[in-house]
């Protein structure tokens, strides 16, 4: 089945270029040119991934990302200004899974999309006999990539789910930030370790009753993170 991608940017030449290249890889591409249109299409469409520019009219990419996260866990890659670290961190804080800096090589864009898709497919295919993980009030449906706390579904991003799944499948094993960056984002990922910290913080805010005193995802100071078995 062809992957469905929503490309959002107010620069039509960029949208046209990305769309053309993705279609060459047999992906189905839909487009939007402002934040409000992006949210509307994300709500109505069934996309596998969204490429979302930060600087958009009507609704910024950050606000659009946050709005989409209220109803969908579709992977979102933010397109940010070159060298603007604040845009990268804010994008992750608002719920993005990844970011690419402009100007970018279209081969990098396609590589990031394929990496996220492979990760999701691998996790779905390898769930095997352990399709359900339960720890206290936390329940992970690995096959359908859904999380519940006290039977209430929690909306995680694709990356947040990947981090939690890796930790939960290996209870009490400590992973350094670099371990997690390599295992979840890939060894060629150009981002830094702050990416991991942002995702852990957002994950705790969603699944922990007291994020400052976590029950599930713990910190081994100076070493890394682990899931309490």
Image: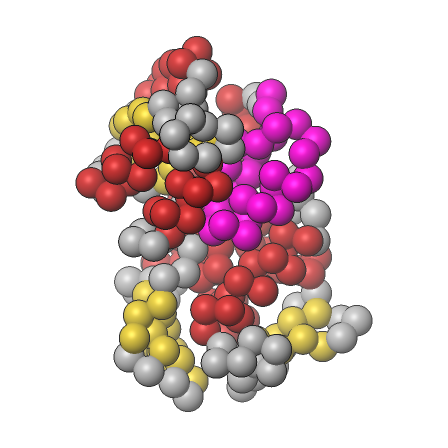
The image position of residue 123, as x and y in percent, is 40, 59
Q: How many marks?
A: 0
Residue furthest to the top in view is 13
The image position of residue 101, as x and y in percent, is 60, 30
Rendered-image quadrant of the C terminus = bottom right
Please name the residue shown 53% across and 80% down the image. Answer: 210
Q: Is residue 111 left or right of residue 31?
A: right
Residue 93 on the magenta span: yes
Give whichever of 117, 139 is nearer the camera: 139
The image position of residue 155, as x and y in percent, is 36, 62
Residue furthest to the right in view is 222
The image position of residue 120, as x and y in percent, is 40, 52
Q: Is residue 125 left or right of residue 63?
A: left
Please name the residue shown 68% across and 39% down the image. Answer: 85
Give whichever of 164, 91 is nearer the camera: 91
Give whichever of 3, 214 is nearer the camera: 214
Residue 69 on the magenta span: no
Residue furthest to the front in view is 58
Q: Which residues are magenta?
A: 78-103
Please tell me in which quadrant of the rendered image residue 150 appears.
Answer: bottom left
Q: Is residue 104 left or right of residue 129?
A: right
Q: Would residue 186 be seen by someone viewing this image from the given angle?
A: no
Please name the residue shown 32% across and 34% down the image. Answer: 36
Q: Is residue 63 left or right of residue 184?
A: left
Rendered-image quadrant of the N terminus = top left
Q: Would residue 202 be seen by someone viewing this image from the given angle?
A: yes
Depicted 85 relative to depicted 199: above or below:
above
Q: Which colour assignment does the render follow? A: secondary structure
Please name the residue shown 61% across and 28% down the image. Answer: 81
Depicted 5 relative to depicted 134: above or below:
above
């Amino acid at each position: 089945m062809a992957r469905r991608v929503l490309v959002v940017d107010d620069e039509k030449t960029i949208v046209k270029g990305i769309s053309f290249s993705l279609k060459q890889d047999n992906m189905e591409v839909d487009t939007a040119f402002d934040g409000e249109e992006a949210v509307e299409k994300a709500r109505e469409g069934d996309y596998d991934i969204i490429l979302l520019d930060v600087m958009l009219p009507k609704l910024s990419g950050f606000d659009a990302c946050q709005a989409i996260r209220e109803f969908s866990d579709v992977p979102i890659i933010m397109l940010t200004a070159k060298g603007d670290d604040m845009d990268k961190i804010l994008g992750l804080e608002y719920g993005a899974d990844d970011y690419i800096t402009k100007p970018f090589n279209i081969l990098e864009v396609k590589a990031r999309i394929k990496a996220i898709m492979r990760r999701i497919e691998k996790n779905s295919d390898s769930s095997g006999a352990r399709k359900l993980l339960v720890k206290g009030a936390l329940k992970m449906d690995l096959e359908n990539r859904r999380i519940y706390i006290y039977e209430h579904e929690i909306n995680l991003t694709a990356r947040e789910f990947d981090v939690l799944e890796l930790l939960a499948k290996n209870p009490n094993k400590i992973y350094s930030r670099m371990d997690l960056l390599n295992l979840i984002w890939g060894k060629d990922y150009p981002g830094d370790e702050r990416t991991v910290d942002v995702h852990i913080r957002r994950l705790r805010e969603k699944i922990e009753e007291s994020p400052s005193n976590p029950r599930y995802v713990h910190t081994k100071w100076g070493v890394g993170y682990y899931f309490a078995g």
